Structures are given as structure tokens and as C-alpha cells.
Image (cartoon, coloured by chain):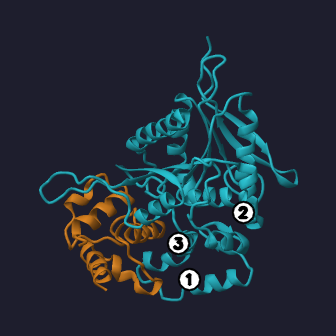
Chain colours: A orange, B cyan
Amino acid sequence: MIEERHVLALLDDVLSLGGRSARFTRDTPLMGAIPELDSMAVVSLITSLEERFGLLIDDDEIDGATFATVGSLVDFVARKQAA
Amino acid sequence: MRAAPPFEALQLQACRGESRFALFHAAHTLPGGAARGQVVYVHPFAEEMNKSRRMAALQARRLAAAGFDVLQPDLRGCGDSDGELSDTRWSDWMDDIAGAASWLRQRRAAGTDAPLCLWGLRAGALLACEAARSRATQIGPCQFLFWQPSMQGRQVLQQFLRLATAGQWARPGATAGSSPTLEALRRTLAQGQAVDIAGYTLPADLAQGLSQATLAPPPPLDPEGGDLAWLEVAPTLDDPTGGAAAPALLPASDAGVSQWQAAGYRVFTQAVTGPSFWQSVEIEEAPGLLEATTQAMQAMQARVGAS
């Protein structure tokens, strides 16, 4: 079961946050709020989510809102896993 | 006494009068001693190559200190090598890897039997595997060392193509359709045309070779079977009780490992805690991986020497 802490661990890894993700909550904004989260980091993040959790993510399943907050990203991953 | 230089920069001869830039780390052996093994490093694709350069260099130095010759060529169109990526063919990369293996074998001290190992990171593991398969005669029997191996070239290509489409998610308010879709990019490649993504011009032939590449094991050329070391890094993950969970291989890797075992390879696997240095925003080091890899390589040679 993918939990928030798994997603935070991946965020920390890809974005080189050095543990800062420990202070994140569901409401923490991501896209636009974290400068490291550019399009290349987004791709790395999707790759990590796919590989680490065995998901297959289609291009049209993602939009800007997916990465709005920690919560929106966790919900997206949970929906994918349940599918 | 002057210390041995850590590495030499070389120009390897390649096809069509071209050359390939390579770093060569000579094994640290006593005078008259021979290298215990020879390693060709196959780098990953695009930005992953750049981000992982430091880790590759650190590992090469450690392996040299442990008695291995290590050759790190830049493939055609990559890094400091001749050729543009835009007119590079998949077969060029296969030839480059085979050429590097040949160069090392020719360097091997007469009468010694240092085994050859193809070491690949991410897509580099795929390239190493496909080269061993398609250039078997030239490369000969070899061991494999995989770092976080990509198992399907199709996926590597998709991850790369995504760079073009991800821009629309990264810019708040960007309108849909402002970036090409994955479908449109694939159509362009299928029509034999190159695509421009993130500063790279990827030609259709290379994309096709990559999309057909898999990590399926080539038959071991040694009747005693082959050797593979499969290593991965995983981010730290605290378990709910506050301790750190032991790192494990990615879920999909287990099937790959079984496939290699079934094909007659002795497979050593290990996952260590560390950053995904080939893709992280900052250049990172994974000391645990350096240590684990050096030990795994030493063990692989000890097994060979004992047989």
C-alpha cells in the first residue's frame, strides 16, 4: 500500500531535498512552490513512481493539478494503485 | 616515486575514420602483475549520463585500485566523442561497445586470463546486454555488472519522450496542446524522422534500436555459465516504528534476475540505500553503492579464479 511517506521519500530523493520533505503535509504546495520541480524533475518523479511502485502512467492521466500539492499527488498515486 | 596517474584520456579508433573519447583507469598492480579483470563502462542516455558522471568516475577509480582495468568510452554522439547524435545509428553504439571490449582485450598482458565485464548503468545495461548479444564474436565471453538496470528500452524511450510533454504540467496555466503529445512524437519517429527533445536530436534509427532493446540475457558463452552482479540504490524509507526499512530491489527486477538465473548465470543482487544519482536534481554520490560494487566485483573474480 502506497502511503504519504513513500511519496515523500521519492520527492526527497528526486529533488535532493535532504530531508526537508519530513516537514511536508498534505497541503504543502509542490508545483510552482518548489523551484527544483521543473519539467525534468517531473519526468524523473513519474519514472520513480512507476518503477518503485510498479505503476504504468499514461500521458493523459496527468495534468497540472496532479502536482499541485503533496495531497493531490498522493491521491493520484493511490487511485492508480487501486485501479 | 611518482604516483600513477588516476586515468588517461584516450581517443579510440572507431568506424569511418572517427574516434571516440574514453577515459582509461589502469589497474593498480605490482610491477609484473596483471589486472585481475577488465571492465567496459556503458553510460546511460542523455541527461542521466551527465548526472552520473561523478559516480562512474569514483567507481572506476575504486575498481582500478582493486586491480581492474576500467575503460569508459563516450558512445558516438555523446559526451566528447565524434559524431552527432542526430546521425548516429544503433549499430554505431553496438560497435562502440564491441570496440571498447576489443581494445581492453588487446591490452591484456600476454598469458593472463583477466575476465571481461560489461558494466552498465540504467539504459547502459540494456546497451551492454544488446551488444553482448549482437556482437558476441567480437566481445566474447563476458561478465555483467548492472547498476539500476532499465529492463525495457521501450520504457527508456518513453521516459525520454516525456521530457517534451512534461513542460505543459510544469508551467501553471500552460494550455493543453502547447507541447507535442507522446503520440505525435512516436508518429514522427515511425515516419523515420528525428525528434528534438530537451536539446537532444534523437534520430529514428536510434529510437527504434532503443525501443527494441531488452535486458533478456544473452546465452553465456562460457560452458561453466555466466556471472552477473545486479545492484540498485533505494531511497531511505523509515518504517512506521521509526526504524529504517532495509532496501530492496525494485519490484520488476525480481523477474529479470530469475530470467538470468534460468539462462545459466550466477546472479548476485544487492540493494543499498542511496540517492538516484542519475536523475536527482543535484549531483549526488552513493558511497554505499561504491563499496558494494567493489566487493561484488572482487567476489565475482574470486569465483572465476577458483574454478
Q: Is residue A38 above or below residue B31?
A: below
Which kind of residue does numbered mark 3 sit on?
Gln
Residue at (43% x, 48% y) in the render: B284
Residue indicated by mark 1: B182
Residue A23, position in %: x, y?
Answer: 20, 60
Indicate which disc residue B85 carries. Answer: 2
Q: Is residue A53 left or right of residue A75?
A: right
The correct choice, above or below, for A70 with respect to B222 in the image is below
In the rendered structure, find residue B303 and report the number of the disc placed on it. Answer: none
Say which element carries label 3. Answer: helix
- Of residues B19 and B181, which is closer to you in this image? B19
Whole-number angstrom distance, CA of label 1 to CA of label 3: 12 Å
Chain containing mark 1: B
The amino acid pointed to by label 1 is: Leu
Task: Determine whether, in the image, residue B105 is placed left or right of residue B263.
Answer: right
Mark 3 lies on residue: B155
Label 2–label 3 contact, CB within 8 A: no
Q: The disc labelled 2 sits on which kind of residue?
A: Leu
Disc with the residue nearer the chain's start (2 vs 1)? 2
